Image (cartoon, helix red, strand yellow):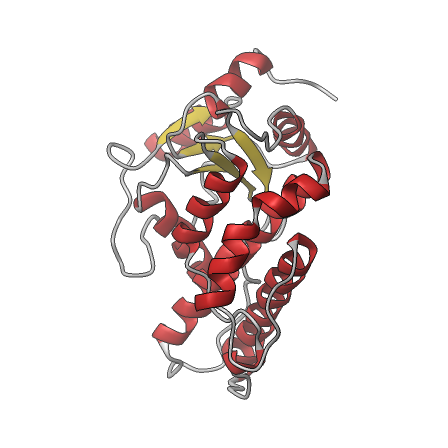
Amino acid sequence: MEKYKNEEYLKNEIMGQSRHQFIFGYDGIQRKQFIENMANNYDIVLDKDSPMAICIPEFGLPKISACSSELSKDKINLISSEFLYFSIASEILLKAKATNDINILNERVINLIGVLNKCGINDGYPPIVDLDDLIRILIQSKEFYKKCYIDYYGEGKDTTSINELALPLLQFDMFITLLKRGIKNESYFGIIIDKQSDIALSSTQAINGLIGSRMNKDISMKIAVKPDNWDLYSDLSGQMISSIHDYETVELDDSQSQYLKKIMK
């Protein structure tokens, strides 16, 4: 497999700073392997201020045709943002579990679990007991919102209720803050998205919302994508994100220069 020029420099340029980034490169296995190798170099470290990289394999809802033009935009926005939050949160904890002692981690997330049990768990559901239980509940919520989107957006079915979930909503910024406090790492999570196929426009906007929120001291979005394959640059409220204020770009290959030449022609 051919490597990019100056791979170590590129990895440091991406994970060595907390700014949100669009990482431009051609689709394919070369970009995928580069991203995965980079993420493997930045584990979730306890008691040390060190950047942490997490690849998010399922970051967007599927791109399907709307069954109607009368669907609730607010409902679609809620589904899209919660799916993204639960997906990121579960992948962070899965990597933390894979790279650290589970007994130590259970001690470190006691406060986070306590807050979720107090102000997040639905009535009638048992409290979260440990890290594995929390991961299970996060994944359950993520899968719920995926099914809810397919049923509602694709078929117009509105038969599901968040009352079916132990943890229906995630206060994402609070979750990240409490997790970082527990693991005693004041650096940021580099959330890596490798977009090799189409996703729902509302998922693109949800991701843009994290970029525009400027919470990069905690969450730094790293979007690997072909230059012409990011469908829009507005968030769920219609607010535009800007390369001047909200993100910067990194070029893996000549895809960006070729794209600009094509536009000029």
Question: Residue sitting at 38 percent across and 48 percent down?
Answer: 210
Seen in the image, is 99 located left or right of residue 5? right
Q: Is residue 183 visible?
A: yes
Picture quadrant of residue 124 = bottom right
Seen in the image, is 24 located left or right of residue 141? left
Task: Please identify the quadrant where the C terminus is shown.
Answer: top left
Question: Residue sitting at 42 percent across and 50 percent down?
Answer: 207
| Front position in the image: 10 or 31 | 10
Q: x and y percent of residue 67 in the render?
A: 50, 81
Residue at the outermost right position: 1
Q: x and y percent of residue 208 in the render?
A: 37, 49
Q: x and y percent of residue 234 in the render?
A: 31, 52
| Front position in the image: 84 or 90 | 90
Q: x and y percent of residue 154 in the render?
A: 54, 77
Q: Is residue 224 visible?
A: no
Picture quadrant of residue 220 = top left
Question: Residue sitting at 49 percent across and 31 percent down?
Answer: 185
